[in-house]
Image (tube, rainbow, N blue to C red):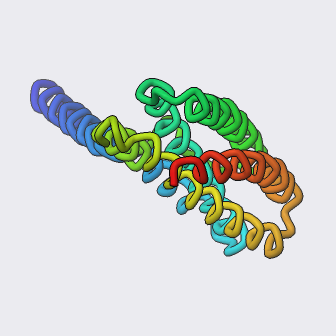
């Protein structure tokens, strides 16, 4: 009888370990953005809290994408002005990430903890652009993205009442407008 119980317990333990390891394998296959979204879906039932959580996740992803692309520009560009703008983007968007982490922590929101698959794909694309086209294409894309981001954040600022999110947006808009002015001026020299 003891032997049957022992064998049964061994099988139960082995099965539990296999299921547990299987869940971790699936989790490792998921992108950090997907993991954060899954955690937030489980945490929040309130529509406004869900919208805030998704905004923080999306903003984190966008900052990682901008940082990864700018790092490529720093290493690939031969233009001092492009490198200067790219370095400013890395610095300012890393500061944005720090603020996002503070806001997310205060609200109990999960956000991506490392560059997402989107960010890494963006970086890969920039690494594949031909050298003679890189600076012009990079600055052109930055100009469009920054213009769109400014419009999106202005809209979000007008629609949110959360003071932490409003503070983040206000700080980010200041940086984005400064970047955009420099980018637009540089873009004009490439035409």
User: Relative to residue 3, is residue 57 depicted above or below?
Assistant: below
Depth check, front residue: 114 or 73: 73
Total label count?
A: 0
Q: Residue at x 89, y 58 (%)?
A: 163
Q: Residue at x 79, y 75 (%)?
A: 159
Q: Is residue 181 left or right of residue 80?
A: right
Q: Quadrant of the N terminus?
A: top left
Depth check, front residue: 5 or 112: 112
Looking at the picture, how far across and down is residue 24, in whole percent? 31, 38
Q: Is residue 160 visible?
A: yes
User: Relative to residue 150, is residue 87 depicted above or below?
Assistant: above
User: Relative to residue 186, is residue 86 depicted above or below?
Assistant: above
Looking at the picture, how far across and down is residue 148, in whole percent? 62, 65
Q: Is residue 168 left or right of residue 179?
A: right
Looking at the picture, how far across and down is residue 89, in whole percent? 63, 37
Q: Residue at x 26, y 35 (%)?
A: 21
Q: Residue at x 19, y 32 (%)?
A: 14
Q: Is residue 163 left or right of residue 25?
A: right
Looking at the picture, how far across and down is residue 79, in whole percent? 52, 30
Q: Is residue 23 visible?
A: no
Q: Is residue 132 left or right of residue 19?
A: right
Depth check, front residue: 68 or 80: 80
């Amino acid at each position: 009888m003891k032997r049957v119980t022992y064998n049964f317990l061994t099988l139960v333990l082995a099965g539990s370990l296999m299921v547990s390891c299987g869940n971790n394998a699936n989790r490792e296959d998921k992108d950090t953005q997907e993991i954060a979204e899954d955690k937030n879906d489980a945490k929040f039932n309130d529509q406004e809290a869900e919208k805030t959580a998704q905004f923080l996740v999306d903003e984190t992803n966008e900052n990682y994408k901008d940082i990864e692309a700018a790092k490529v520009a720093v290493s690939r560009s031969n233009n001092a002005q492009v490198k200067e703008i790219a370095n400013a983007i890395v610095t300012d968007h890393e500061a944005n990430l720090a603020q996002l982490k503070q806001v997310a922590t205060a609200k109990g929101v999960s956000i991506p903890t490392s560059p997402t698959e989107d960010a890494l794909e963006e970086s890969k694309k920039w690494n594949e652009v031909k050298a003679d086209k890189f600076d012009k294409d990079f600055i052109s894309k930055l100009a469009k993205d920054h213009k769109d981001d400014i419009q999106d954040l202005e809209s979000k600022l007008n629609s949110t009442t959360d003071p932490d999110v409003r503070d983040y947006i206000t700080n980010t808009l200041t940086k984005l407008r400064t970047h955009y002015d420099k980018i637009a001026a540089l873009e004009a020299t490439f035409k």
